[in-house]
């Protein structure tokens, strides 16, 4: 219950802090998609509490409950990755390790590790997945195509800007990783 309330408060804070910029950007483009993920939340939770901002969102949009079936054992990173790829996907031990580029992990920055693993440069506001090779390896073991980032790619192709807000940090032996950026 405490985790639900903390998640809800974070959601309300995020929504209140981004509502004005989103409103002004939606005047330039009528295309807007917002995906809020509230793990372990059901209809009864939404009915039980007075949630005026959530109710306001539901009046303007849609509400759906979803159980995400992953390609392997269930984990939150695998569920997020499945949503982002549009098909059942798996995440191994390292696959859910996402960081802001300047965050430290294993005695260096996430940016340095990402560059080491991929050879790619990191932009200023990028979030990097230092377990990208793990995601690719997991996907190659399946008998169907898994495309990391497909949801974001499709949204961008249709003129919908993609942003990530949130916090799903988990403790790891070398630091804290954000698991909710696998969309």
Image (tube, rainbow, N blue to C red):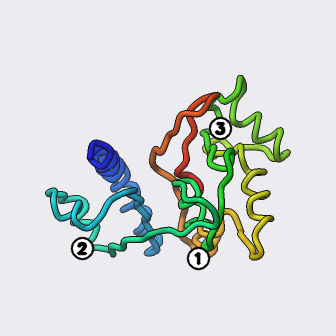
Callout 1: SS: loop
| Residue 37 higher or lower than 27, as above or below | above
| Residue 64 higher or lower than 100, as above or below | below
Circle 2 sits on which residue?
59
> Whole-percent x and y of residue 117?
82, 43
First of labels 2, 3 by sequence position: 2
Pointer 3 local density, CA inside 10 Å: few below 14, some 14–19, many at least 20: many
- For residue 80, what is the image quadrant? bottom right
Q: What separation in Å lies between label 1 and label 3 (alpha carbons)?
A: 27 Å
> Whole-percent x and y of residue 5?
26, 46
Q: Residue at x 33, y 44 (%)?
A: 3
Q: What separation in Å lies between label 1 and label 2 (alpha carbons)?
A: 24 Å
- Numbered circle sitting on residue 158: 1
- How many marks the image carries: the answer is 3
Q: Residue at x 47, y 72 (%)?
A: 29
Q: Nearer the viewer, mark 1 or mark 3?
A: 3
- Numbered circle sitting on residue 101: 3
């Amino acid at each position: 219950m405490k985790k639900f309330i903390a998640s809800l408060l974070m959601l309300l804070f995020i929504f209140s802090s981004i509502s004005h910029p989103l409103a002004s950007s939606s005047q330039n483009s009528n295309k807007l998609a917002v995906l809020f993920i509230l793990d372990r939340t059901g209809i009864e939770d939404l009915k039980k509490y007075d949630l005026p901002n959530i109710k306001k969102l539901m009046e303007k949009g849609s509400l759906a409950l979803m159980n995400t079936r992953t390609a392997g054992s269930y984990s939150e990173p695998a569920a997020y990755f499945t949503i982002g790829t549009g098909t059942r996907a798996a995440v191994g031990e390292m696959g859910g390790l996402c960081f802001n580029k300047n965050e430290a992990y294993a005695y260096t920055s996430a940016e340095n590790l990402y560059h080491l693993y991929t050879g790619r440069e990191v932009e200023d506001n990028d979030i990097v997945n230092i377990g990208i090779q793990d995601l690719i390896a997991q996907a190659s073991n399946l008998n169907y195509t898994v495309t990391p980032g497909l949801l974001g790619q499709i949204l961008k192709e249709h003129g919908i800007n993609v942003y990530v807000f949130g916090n799903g940090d988990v403790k790891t032996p070398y630091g804290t990783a954000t698991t909710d950026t696998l969309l």
